[in-house]
Every structure is written in C-alpha cells, then in structure tokens.
Image (tube, coloured by chain):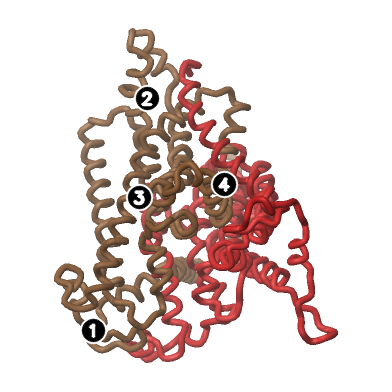
Amino acid sequence: MENKTIYPKASLADYGYRETPAYVKKITKILKAALTYFIVFLLYVSVIVIFIESLNSSHDMRSFDQVTLKWYTNIFTQVQDTEQIKAMLIVVKNTFVVSIIATLVATVLGTFFAIGLYSFQKKKRQQWMLMNNIPLLNADIVTGISLMLLFSLLRPLFPSIFGLFTLVIAHLFFTFPYVILSVMPKLKETDPNLMDAALDLGVKPFKSIVKVLIPAVQSGVFAGMLLAFTMSIDDFVISYFNKGGYNNLSIWLYGVLGKTDATPSVYALSTLMTLFTLVALVVFQSINNHNNKKGKLWLRK
Amino acid sequence: MNRLYKGLARPYQVWLIVLVFIPLLSMLLISVSNYSVGMDLANLQITLSHWNLLYENVSSTPGTFSNPFITAFTNSLTGAFFTTIISFVLGYFVAYQIKRSRVKNKLIIMTIIILPMWTNLLLRVGGFANIMLENNIIESIFGINPLGGLFGTWPGIVFALVVTYMPFMILPVYTALEKIDISLEEASLDLGLTPFKTFWKVIFPLSMKGVVTGSIMVFLPTFAGFAIPKLLGGNIYFIGNMIENRFIYTRNYAEGSLLSMVVLIIILGSLLLITRFDKEGETLL
C-alpha cells in the first residue's frame, strides 16, 4: 500500500480571482436598477405633467384645484372655450391627414426603394445609403428651410403651392429614410435563394417581390411604418417652414403655448392621443404574436 | 439578388438629388446675394456685405464686444456639448442595463423609450416650462418643487434638452450593444479580465458605432433646434432662434441662408465622422 499524497485543493482566490462580497453585489444591483428606472421616469416627467393638467379643473396651469374630467368631455361637447377647441380640432385633423398620407406613401414606396437599393453593388449601395441618411442627420431647421427655398422657386409656376402638398412632400422627405433603414437589415437577413427559387419556378419578377420578398421582410416594413408615423406626427420644425396656411398641431401649439387663454382641453386631447396610439400598438403586437404562433407568417425570422 | 430590381431605386435617387442638392445650392447662392423677400429682382446682386453679421461689434458701450451671432453660436455649442455628454453618460447606462436584463422583445423596449415622443414635443416642453416656474402645479399638489426656478436658466434648458433627446442616444447604443456576441464577453471573463476591464476593453470599443451615431443624433438637433430655447430660455437664445427670426419675421433670406450655411458646415463634419464609424447607418435606428 502506498501512501496517497493529499494535495491541497486550489481555491478560486489562488487563481487570482476575487469574489465580490454578496452584499456589495446586491447593493450595486439595486442601485443600478433604481437609477435606470429613475432615468426612464425622467423621460416621462413631462407626459405626467400633461396628464395632471388634463385633470385639473382650474383654468390656471399653475395651481391644482380639483380632479375633473370636464376637459375630456369638453372636446366632444364644446361647452367651454368653443373657439379654441374648434381651432384645435382642425389642426389635429390636419396633423393626421398629413401624417397618414405621408406614412402610407413612405411605407409602400420606401419598401420598393429599399429593395432597389439592396440590389446595388456593395460600394454603390453604401454611397446611396449615405445619401439616404442625409435627411435624417441634417438639422431640421436646415431641411425645413432648404425645402422652403425649393418650393419658393416653384411658386411663380404654382402660386398656391404651399399647403397640404408641400407638407406631404416635406414629410415624405424625412419619412422615407426611416422606412428604408428599417427594411434594409431585414433584406440582408433574407436567404438570397428564396428569390432565385421564386424566379426559377416561373414567378414574374414583380410578383415575386410582392409574394416572396415583402412577406419575408414585413417586420421591418411595420417597424419602419411605426417610426415614420412617430416622426411625422411629432414634427414641428420642418412643417413650420413649409406650412403655407396649413397648420398642424405643433405649429398651432407654438403659437398658443404659454398664453393664459390656452384651453386645458389640449392636455386632455394629447393624453387621449397617446393612450390611443399605445392601445393600437398593443393590439397590433398581440395580433402579430397570435399570427406568428399559428405559423401564418412562417417566413418571418 | 436580381439585378433586375435596381430600377426600383431610380425614382428615389432622383428624389434625393432634387430635394437635397437643388435646395442647398440655392441656399448657397442666396447666402452670397442681397436677396430678401419682396425685393425687386432687378436689384439682385452678389454681395458679401451682410457677412459682417458674423463678426461685427454691435456693443453700444465702448471697449466691450458683443455680437449676437457669436453669442448664439457659443450658446448652441455649449448647450449641445453638455446635452450630448450628459445624454451619453445616462443613455449608455440605461442601454447597458436594458441589454444586461436580457429582455428579448425589442419592440417593448423601443415602445417604452419612444412612448414619450408620441406626446407632442411642444406640449412636453410646455410641461417643463410649467414645472420650472416658481409656484407651479407640482408644488400645489405635492408641496415640493424640485425643478422650480429653473426657467430661463442653463440647467433648465440642458435638463429639458437631455430628457427630450436622450431616446436618440439610448436606441442606437442599445442596437450596437445587442449586436455584440455574448461569447466575446464570456471569453474575456474566462481569460481572467475583471468585469470592469471586460467592459472597458471589449464591450465599450465594440459599441462605439452606436455611441457615435447617438452622439450625433443628440448633438445636431440640440445645436440647431430653436423651440426649446425659445419656450424655456428666457434671454438665452440659440443659433436656430436667429435663423427662425431671419426667415419668418424679418424675411431677410440672405442673412438666414448665411446662418444656415454655418449650421450646415457643422452637419457635414458630423456626417463625415459618422461614415467613418458606420458605413450604412446600421445603428441609426
């Protein structure tokens, strides 16, 4: 029988690995979470203020009287601040008209543009993607003014050009890039054999885009649509310079904010619109998930 | 990919050229002319006489120097610089924490970060203007007034700018962080780097693409914006306010175009920077 030498087991510390005490880890974890929530909360501070204002029964923004829903009902019944509410409803309608037209056109055409750009050679594609980013990165004020100058050049030919037309063109100018940027990565992810197979099997080129490629990238298309709508509905600067007589909500607010006669129904309407968009998104998302589970969108990654 | 489809992009190429280059060219031409709205076009001529706007001393007290353009430019630069730095620190932290939390559904994260943007920008700024006054609604309800008195001060403006533009920092940084292969981090830890060193030597350099994009997306709108300084700034004005004034109120397009060209130079610099880091704008969204 030989004696077995018992060697000491090396601990993690012997390898130079220092374990941070558990309580320190826990504290930093809690602190990090708290700070994260706090920063996200900061993003919502103004939204919360708007919500509080919408429940404030006093016309004075600076003091809270009591909770009321009258500013909400007022939008529909218009018993108070009638003129202001009428003006507000018109500009809200204008905002939606411009944003919906711009978003739909940008989504449909932008998807095809993205497919076109995707089929470029790499070098050329990079150059044109850079061009595509110019409207995104350019300062709004420069974009707004440069478009205004362009439309002014056309004014001798079309005297009443400023209005819905110029606004839609201006909005398309900065919504196309968002759609293209969301569709492009999805296009890169698709299997190139997919299109070749479709074409091999005798599907016409245009039909194969509609039936094969677009379903494969549809999540990118929807993301682009969402971003385009978000940017379009919130735009102030670019619209401001190209509005003609066609005011949208932001432009109207720029004029009335801070004035004492501004109706608190603005806050109520804003809260309603935010809630509406949120509900629409949740419904959209759950339908999407439902379809995914049923395997309808089997092409989606 | 089928070369057949190249033609699909043709209208967009034309669109970009018409809407980017023609307007910029006319802006350049106007900035070296004496054009203003309603003038007799027969008197139009090339002149640089209004360029003294950029350096002329308008101070009425002798021995002192004041020039509205230099003040506005410095204000814009200072505001944009501090906003970018603070947004970077806070935004990177949030993006990193979201990444660590391993939430799979990107749409939910995007929604939480973007949701405030669905409330109109001007209304949000109006909300800040409200709670930055003395005696505001927060004080009347909760009895505390953390932001009171910030109206018209630098901290107030920078706070509003940071909160407004931070989402544009969080999203690209998160996109960049999300693309980093997790095995790189594991390898680094395995090979004995401390968590901090792993972050500093591995994660952070790989997320630079997102940081550069985010910084530019925050810097540019802050530098050139005019709504926030106008609604919150009191006496502090940015270069955007001057441009707005020239185009909307005094209708002096020549001066306005000149000021816009100054902004454009800053933008071109940023564009060059961004193309060095991110060739196809992958982190822009």
Residue A213 disc label: 2
Q: Amino acid at mark 2?
A: Leu
Q: Amino acid at mark 4?
A: Glu
Confirm whether circles 1 and 2 share one chain. yes
Q: Nearer the viewer, mark 4 or mark 2?
A: 2
Separation of marks 4 and 2 at Cα, in angstroms: 35 Å
Q: Residue at x 24, y 56 (%)?
A: A279
Separation of marks 3 and 4 at Cα, in angstroms: 43 Å
Quadrant containing the N terminus of chain A in the rendered view: top right
Label 3 crowd (10 A; few <14 / some 14-19 / many >=20):
many
Q: Residue at x 42, y 68 (%)?
A: B122
Q: Earlier in the sequence, mark 1 or mark 2?
A: 1
| Front-most of residues A195 and B232 | B232
Q: Are marks 1 and 2 in contact (CB under 8 Å)?
A: no
Q: Residue at x 64, y 67 (%)?
A: B76
Q: Which residue is mark 3?
A: A99
Residue A57 disc label: 1
Chain letter of mark 4 equals B
Q: Which residue is mark 4?
A: B185
Separation of marks 3 and 2 at Cα, in angstroms: 26 Å
Q: Amino acid at mark 1?
A: Ser
Confirm whether circles 3 and 1 share one chain. yes
Q: Amino acid at mark 3?
A: Ser
In the picture shown, does residue B254 fall above or below A178? Answer: below
| Front-most of residues B234 and A272 | B234
Q: Residue furthest right?
A: B63
Separation of marks 3 and 1 at Cα, in angstroms: 32 Å
